[in-house]
Amino acid sequence: MTKNRSIRDALAPHLPHLRRYARALAGSQQSGDVYVRMTLESLLAAPEQWTLAANANDLQARVALFQLFHTVTLSAETPLPGNVEVPEGGMQALLLTAVEGFSVAETAAILGETEESIAGQVSRAKTSIAETIQSRVLIIEDEPLIAMHLEQIVEDMGHEVSGMAMTHEDATIRAHEVRPELVLADIQLADGSSGLDAAREILTSFDVPVIFITAYPERLLTGERPEPAYLVTKPFKADTVIATIGQALLARKFKKADVD
């Protein structure tokens, strides 16, 4: 690695991943991106905190960025949009390991915990996910093998796959038939239509979390326009899908409790 690279060069590869993590924690793009912006503002105000990380290897730089993110969010006093707080307990640890791919040791460094504590948090998070109320799930996916894999994951979690669709039109029709409580959607559908457009239309009628499954997550993690809160990268691991579904449903539960 070239020494004395700029902070911008060191940050660039990792910002999309930080946005994905922050949005999943907060349950929305708006709130998650505020966390990320606060992190970057802190870094710009005191760039010396990034100097060593900027010249470290990519993994060390990534760990340092996520560490700073957690330092900033824990000390934040400004209310975030949507009144969504970062959840306590093991979901942070589970998302860091299962979705962002950090090891237990790296996750412990990010959260300032012991490895034993992180292992316990991950275990508790998985228990919380297993105890979530059964939900109706709509899967929008044009590749049969992937659709079947997602269906198996969802059903193994104890949820009901209430509908399957391969096109935008079919997805909107099925949504009104089954009234889903969660949507899993591919981006590019069979007839050339868009899973993003299908989800947007569904969201005009149903207030439900949508998890997008895509081979190109970076295209939806720019922070420059309306983008999804939940993203899973293809090819995916079952644990990644499970963690993301669990976080989406728990965030929806907390959101409904706040409204009630």
Image (tube, helix red, strand yellow):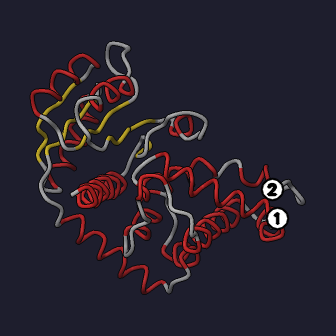
Label of residue 47 in the image: 1
Q: Is disc 2 surrounded by few (<14), some (14 to 19) or many (20+) residues within 10 Å?
A: some
Quarter occupied by residue 112? bottom right
Q: Who is closer to the viewer here, 85 or 228?
A: 85
Which residue lies at the image location 33% right of the left edge and 58% below the top edge? Answer: 247
Nearer mark to the viewer, of 1 and 2: 1
Label 1 is placed on what type of residue? Answer: Pro
- Image location (x, y in percent) of residue 150: 24, 42
Quarter occupied by residue 165? top left
Which residue lies at the image location 43% right of the left edge and 57% below the top edge? Answer: 26
- Image quadrant occupied by the C terminus: bottom left
Q: Is 132 rendered above or below residue 127?
A: above
- Image location (x, y in percent) of residue 118: 43, 79
- Image location (x, y in percent) of residue 98: 41, 61
- Mark 2, residue position: 7
Label 2 is placed on what type of residue? Answer: Ile
Which residue lies at the image location 38% right of the left edge and 14% below the top edge? Answer: 192
Q: Who is closer to the viewer here, 63 or 83?
A: 83
> In the rendered structure, are the residues bearing label 1 and label 2 in contact, judged by CB atoms less than 8 Å apart?
yes
